[in-house]
């Protein structure tokens, strides 16, 4: 993992801790944060870390650590406190920063903070990353998440699906609040944890994901309820729902790593670079190299394999 630095150091060089050591440190830190914040915060300001935001992050950490009972408890606490968007308009307004519906914690962005939307498209119109054809094809037409103002940006075409979640205002393209945690993720965590715990409850797992899907329907026949026959079936469906719901919010990489999955692009998404169609599970390129400057500064860091 990375070195744990929980004190002021000047000349000391610290080695990388193990993943287990790091996760234990993170869990202790989150517990302390919750106990401290719970004395001073009323959860009303989603632009600041609140007790509820800490519980949401604890739910994510518990899921990644396969501590499913904790994931269920933490995610349920957040679900009980934060409702899903009431309708399609309210959902679209999340991405226009016109509503804080579903938001548990976000980074408020003002001019000069950096424009997250420019990761995908520059303010001069240059495209760096599009919505892939493969991803777009996973959405039903009457799924609000596929709509202009959410997944795709106004002016998008089938030849140029522009990322819409962080478009921001016309006067300062890409300046949008960064939604770090939304309650929608908690429904997906709850569903996965119910399916993977020691005594799986597929009814509860399906109920959690179906509540989320119901909130995304534009017609009564869209996004029919799912059922899970076994753990493998549940994970396939939950991962697809996570891919759609959390697109461009920073989760897909971790989902692939958690389940040792590779990247399998369709040919139409790699026309300009056919050699980039696949990345096999475990490929060393899933982990970036440590910058040489960091290694020069700390002799105890060792470069990641194959670099």
Image (cartoon, helix red, strand yellow):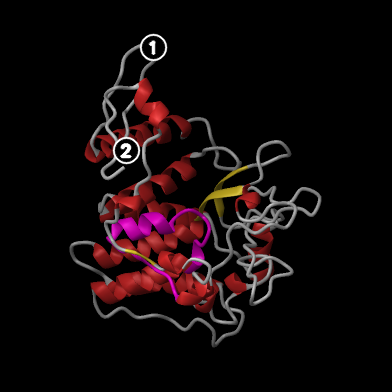
x%, y% of residue 40? 52, 30
The residue sitting at the left extreme is 198
Callouts 1 and 2 close, C-beta under 8 Å:
no
The residue sitting at the top extreme is 11
Q: Nearer the viewer, mark 1 or mark 2?
A: 1
User: Is 31 on the left-hand or right-hand side of 143?
Assistant: left
**Disc 1: CA contacts within 10 A as few (<14), some (14-19) or many (>=20):** few
Note whether residue 204 is visible.
Answer: no
Tag 1, which secondary structure? Answer: loop
Residue 250 painted magenta: yes
Q: Which mark is residue 66?
A: none
- In which quadrant will I find the N terminus? top left
Q: Vertically, is 148 above or below 178?
A: below
User: Is 269 on the left-hand or right-hand side of 74?
Assistant: right
x%, y% of residue 197? 23, 62
Stretch in magenta: 244-266
- The residue that appears at 34% across and 80% down in the rendered structure is 227
The residue indicated by pointer 1 is 10
Which one is nearer the viewer's eye here, 53 or 294? 294
Residue 193 painted magenta: no
Tag 2, which secondary structure? Answer: helix
- The residue that appears at 48% across and 66% down in the rendered structure is 273
Note whether residue 77 is visible.
Answer: yes
Q: Which mark is residue 27?
A: 2
């Amino acid at each position: 993992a990375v070195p744990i630095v929980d004190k002021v150091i000047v000349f000391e060089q610290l080695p990388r801790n193990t993943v287990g050591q790091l996760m234990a440190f993170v869990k202790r830190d989150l517990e302390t944060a919750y106990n401290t914040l719970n004395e001073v915060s009323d959860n009303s300001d989603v632009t600041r870390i609140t007790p509820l935001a800490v519980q949401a992050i604890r739910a994510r950490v518990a899921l990644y650590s396969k501590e499913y009972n904790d994931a269920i408890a933490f995610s349920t606490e957040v679900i009980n406190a934060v409702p899903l968007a009431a309708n399609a308009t309210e959902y679209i307004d999340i991405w226009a920063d016109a509503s804080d519906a579903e938001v548990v914690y976000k980074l408020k962005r003002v001019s000069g903070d950096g424009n997250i939307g420019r990761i995908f498209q520059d303010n001069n119109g240059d495209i760096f990353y599009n919505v892939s054809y493969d991803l777009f094809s996973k959405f039903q037409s009457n799924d609000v998440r596929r709509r202009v103002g959410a997944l795709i940006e106004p002016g998008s075409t089938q030849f140029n699906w522009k990322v819409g979640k962080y478009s921001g205002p016309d006067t300062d393209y890409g300046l949008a609040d960064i939604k770090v945690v939304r309650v929608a993720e908690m429904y997906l965590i709850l569903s996965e944890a119910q399916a993977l715990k020691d005594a799986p409850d597929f009814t509860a797992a399906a109920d959690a994901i179906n509540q989320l899907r119901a909130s995304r329907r534009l017609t009564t026949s869209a996004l029919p309820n799912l059922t899970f026959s076994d753990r493998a079936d549940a994970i396939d469906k939950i991962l697809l729902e996570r891919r759609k719901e959390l697109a461009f919010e920073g989760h897909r990489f971790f989902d692939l790593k958690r389940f040792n999955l590779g990247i399998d692009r369709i040919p139409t998404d790699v026309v300009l670079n056919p050699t980039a169609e696949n990345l096999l599970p475990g490929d060393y390129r899933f982990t970036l190299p440590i910058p040489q400057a960091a290694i020069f500064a700390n002799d105890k860091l060792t470069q990641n394999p194959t670099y």
